Every structure is written in C-alpha cells, then in structure tokens.
Image: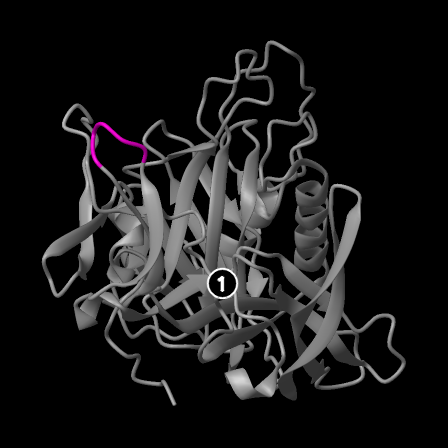
C-alpha cells in the first residue's frame, strides 16, 4: 500500500526530513576494548527498478571481543519498524515475514532511476537508524556473458595434476564518460542426475562385506533434477583503470573439479548488474578484502567495517548497507558439447549397501532395488537417495 509520508510524519516536509537526516549522521568512530560486548545492528537491503517486493535483513553482529567464541555469527533482529522513503514524499512500510527479514507490503513496487531513497529503522530497544540518501542510478546493459576454458594445476601431496576448468566472464561499459562502479550478483542453475550404476556393499552381520558394481532401479522422479544456487561472492569492478571506460573479461565464476557436477548436463547462469556510487563501491571493496583475510563478512575482528547506516539517537555503531540501483540481467547457457571439462559428481562420498546390522541404530534411507526388485539398496545419507533433497524435479520455465 502506497502512502504519503505526511500521514506518518506530521509537520515535516521532505526537505526537512533530509535536513534532519544530515544533522544526525555525523561520523562516529568508537574506541574498542576487550570489555566491549556490544552487539551491533547489521543491515542488508537493496531497492531496484525491478518489480518487488523488496527485502531488508536485520541481524545483530557478535561482540568484537567474544572471549569464548560461543556466540553464533549473527542473530536476527525481530520486531523492528522498517520504512523506505523516497524524495517524492512516498513512504513504504516493510513488515517482518520471517525472523529478521522485512518485506515491502506493496508487492509490485518499483524504484525509479534518478530518485533518492532512505531506509529508516526503529528497533524495539528505542534505537533509531537511517541510511544515507541513496540515489538510484541507471545501469547500462550487459554487453555479453561468455565462458573460457583453461587448464588448472592442482597438487596431491607432491604430485601435480592438470584439469580443465571454465571461467564465466562478463563484458560491459559505462553509459557515459564518468567512471562507473559495477556490482554483479549470480544465480546458477544446472541440470543433474543421480548415479544409478554404483558400487553396492553386500554381506551379513557375521562376515565382511564385499562390493559389486550394480545397475540400481530407481523411481524416475528421484533421478533427474535441477538445482539453483545464489553466489555469495562480492563481485565489483570499476572502469577507473580503463581508458575506454569499459570492463572486458571480468571473471564472475570459475567451475570444475571432481566434486562439481554443474557442467555434466546443461548449465545456466543469471547475471544481475548494478550501478553504485564511489562510497558504496569502497564499502564492498573493504568487505571483499576482509573476506580474503578472515573468511567472513562480519568476522570477530577489531576493525569492523561500517557502511551507510547510522544511529540517530545514540552513539551506537551500525554495520551493513542499503543500496538503490537500477538492474540489468542476462541469462547464459552452457551445454556439454561446448566444453571439455571432465564430468564430476556431487555424490562421491555416498555409500550404498544391501545389508544392515541389527545392532546398528542408524536410520537408513531406501535408494532403489537390484535383482529384479528383490533386493533393496539403501544408505544412511538421505542426500544420496533422492535428487529432490538437493533440488527440484520440476523443469524451470526458462530452461531451453
């Protein structure tokens, strides 16, 4: 539901709202010590020119000094009042759909390039937070997404081996003469099959098991599936180092290896391209550097990385970001005949058997049968019995 902001903020014009915001966001750099046990608000949110709804995630970071390392990496922040306000005076409420996740009530809301947006948050402990005003920038179309095969060397103890891998790359360019700052998000989807010619162990309680290779009869709906995964890589690049103001051959993803089955059948990647300002770009660049050093977006380090979220009624520090950007997308497919990457399997650690020790209290899952249906093949790992544990047997609408 779209509502005018003056319905909620009486006697405050949009101009004064931005003025008030600018007065409450003076930079704050706290001194940190081993007694600092504060748990900081972490914000993750994006609004685009694509049809919503849009989501904002609120969590609480661990203290900088968690002496015993007993706290989880994050905890959801519940019961907050979350709003997005634009520079035309419109206010959009977000409601909690699940723990720590807030979603715009207006499902078909679309941001407008050239407009500015602010995220406001009121938490149950009385703290008020706001983002800096974020301009929604237009973003140019993606020129192309393509793949390049390369040889990769890996080592097993003192022996080196080579195998084929694929890089997925993107080309794009700035819309004008000014330096552009890009961010990409990926969703990979691939078709896969469960192995049905497998090693099966046989035996009894009193003798040692032996194994044979068997063709297992398995229900059709358990064999062939599709799985989608969104990448958590921080993929950013600017045109600052290119005299033509474009980006060529930026690596989005690398895939291959014996445990990777993405390329066995058909593979697809959906690329989303965003545009942002220098400050937001620097934020993600620092986060990426932190990940390379520690392995996590908000690790327990004494140098927490702040974004564009500030506390307006206290000296609390906040982490995270709220971003506004137009978005362009491109989907790219790769078929098995377009590369020479050796087939891998995600089921290399599975073990199947036809027997079960009566004293064994583990739960077994049925995979299929051999010997014309007279002998059941099973395993202790459900993942190894049904492709639907990992994905869906329903073919995606966009699948070629």
In this view, the residue farthest toward the left is 374
Q: Nearer the viewer, residue 369 or 239?
A: 369
- Secondary structure, magenta segment, majority class: loop
Say if the magenta span includes residue 206.
yes
Do we see residue 287 in this rendering?
yes
- Residue 380 location, quadrant: top left
Give residue 387's position: percent from left, percent from top: 28, 62
Q: Quadrant of the C terminus?
A: bottom left
Magenta residues span 204-208
Identified at 18% across, 26% down, the residue is: 361
Identified at 67% across, 72% down, the residue is: 167
Identified at 15% across, 52% down, the residue is: 376
Q: With 257 as the anchor, is 1 left or right in this view?
A: left
Above or below residue 65? Residue 327 is below
Q: Residues within 10 Å of mark 1 (few under 14, many from 20)?
A: many
Say if the magenta span includes residue 176.
no
Give residue 255's position: percent from left, percent from top: 60, 66
Q: Nearer the viewer, residue 307 or 255?
A: 255
């Amino acid at each position: 539901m779209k509502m005018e902001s003056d319905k909620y903020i009486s006697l405050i014009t949009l101009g004064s709202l931005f003025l008030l915001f600018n007065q409450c966001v003076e930079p704050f750099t706290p001194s940190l010590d081993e007694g600092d046990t504060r748990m900081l608000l972490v914000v993750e949110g994006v609004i685009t020119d694509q049809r919503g709804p849009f989501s904002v995630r609120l969590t609480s970071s661990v203290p900088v000094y968690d002496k015993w390392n007993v706290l989880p990496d994050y905890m959801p922040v519940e019961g907050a009042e979350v709003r997005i306000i634009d520079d035309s005076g419109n206010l959009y409420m977000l409601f909690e759909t699940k723990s720590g996740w807030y979603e715009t009530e207006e499902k078909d809301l679309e941001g407008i390039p050239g407009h500015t947006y602010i995220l406001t948050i009121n938490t149950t402990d009385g703290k008020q937070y706001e983002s800096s005003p974020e301009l929604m920038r237009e973003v140019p179309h993606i020129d192309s997404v393509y793949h390049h095969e390369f040889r990769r060397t890996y080592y097993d103890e003192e022996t080196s081996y080579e195998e084929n891998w694929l890089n997925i790359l993107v080309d794009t360019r700035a819309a004008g003469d000014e330096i552009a700052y890009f961010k990409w998000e990926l969703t990979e989807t691939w078709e896969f099959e469960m192995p049905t010619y497998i090693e099966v162990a046989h035996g009894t309680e009193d003798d040692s098991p032996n194994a044979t290779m068997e063709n297992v009869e398995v229900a059709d709906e358990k064999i062939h599936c599709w799985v989608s995964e969104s990448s958590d890589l921080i993929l950013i690049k600017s045109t600052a180092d290119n005299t033509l103001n474009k980006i060529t051959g930026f690596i989005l993803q690398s895939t291959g290896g014996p445990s990777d089955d993405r390329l066995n059948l058909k593979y697809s990647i959906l690329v989303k391209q965003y545009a942002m300002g220098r400050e937001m770009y620097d934020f993600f660049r620092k986060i990426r550097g932190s990940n390379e050093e520690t392995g996590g977006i908000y690790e327990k380090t004494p140098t927490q990385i702040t974004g564009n979220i500030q506390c307006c009624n206290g000296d609390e520090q906040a982490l995270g970001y709220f971003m506004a950007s137009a978005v362009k997308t491109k989907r790219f497919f790769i078929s098995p005949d377009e590369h020479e990457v050796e087939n891998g399997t995600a089921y290399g650690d599975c073990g199947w058997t036809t027997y079960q020790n009566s004293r064994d209290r583990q739960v077994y899952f049925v995979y299929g049968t051999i010997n014309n249906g007279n002998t059941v093949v099973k395993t202790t790992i459900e993942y190894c019995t049904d492709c639907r544990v990992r994905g869906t047997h329903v073919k995606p609408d966009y699948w070629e």
